[in-house]
Amino acid sequence: MDLAIVATICGVIALGAISPGPSFIMVAQTALSSTPARGRTAALGVGAASLIFSVAATLGLGAVMLYAEWLFIVLKIAGGGYLVYLGIRMWLAAGTERPHGHVTPQGGRRTFATALLTQLSNPKAIIVYSSVFASVLPREPSLTLLIAVPLATTLVETAWYLIVATLLSRTRPQHVYERWTKAIDRIAGAALGGLGTYFAIDGIRTVAR
């Protein structure tokens, strides 16, 4: 029974991770524009955010988020604003020289933190984790389930983004990126900013109703 619950939750989380969103854009752009190590660091940042979501949802905070609409609206507006900020930064930095070769600890930490905050500010991720955990987990889950679910979902999401980072860090995608650096960066920045704007406006509209 516990195994079926873990498999169901992991399946939904995997589908959510595969569908393009802010975290995918951030990891993909980092992998293309920087070193393989920094791309993997971004993937680990998203994975860390997934662990936070999983633990919170397992402890019941996901259900609270579903019923405390005002809290979700606040997070949606704030998260949208952060994504707009990231999009503007990416747009303004389009075409600038990228760090290749050795990655400094400071740069790695900044990449990790940016990826972590990008995932945490993603309303889609909040909805997915909150809804699936609240609906699939039993009322009184076993200790094994409480430990297995966060670990399994974190592994699934981290593995997917490590695959993305590894594939896009290869020579051919890097060469394509080097040829179209400014266009790719601006498309990525516009996509992040557009998603952030949509999330923020949708949250504001909910308040105004």
Image (cartoon, grey):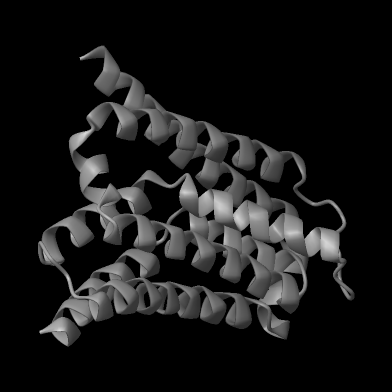
Q: Which residue does the image show at 26% across and 13% down from the upper left?
A: 208
Give the left or right position of residue 196, taking residue 127 as reference: right
> Where residue 161 sits: x, y (%)?
51, 73
> Where residue 73 sits: x, y (%)?
33, 29
Number of numbered discs:
0
Q: Which residue does the image show at 60% across and 75% down from the upper left?
A: 165
From the viewer's side, name the closer residue of 18 and 115: 115
> Where residue 141 sits: x, y (%)?
17, 70
Q: In this view, does 141 lie above or below 6?
A: above
From the viewer's side, name the closer residue of 94 and 69: 69
From the viewer's side, name the closer residue of 51 and 173: 51
Give the left or right position of residue 156, taking residue 146 as reference: right
Q: In which quarter of the image is the N terminus?
A: bottom left
Give the left or right position of residue 70, taking residue 116 as reference: left
Q: Is residue 174 above or below residue 53?
A: below
Q: In this view, does 16 lie above or below 195?
A: below
Q: In which quarter of the image is the C terminus?
A: top left
Give the left or right position of residue 155, taking residue 36 as reference: left
From the viewer's side, name the closer residue of 2 and 131: 2
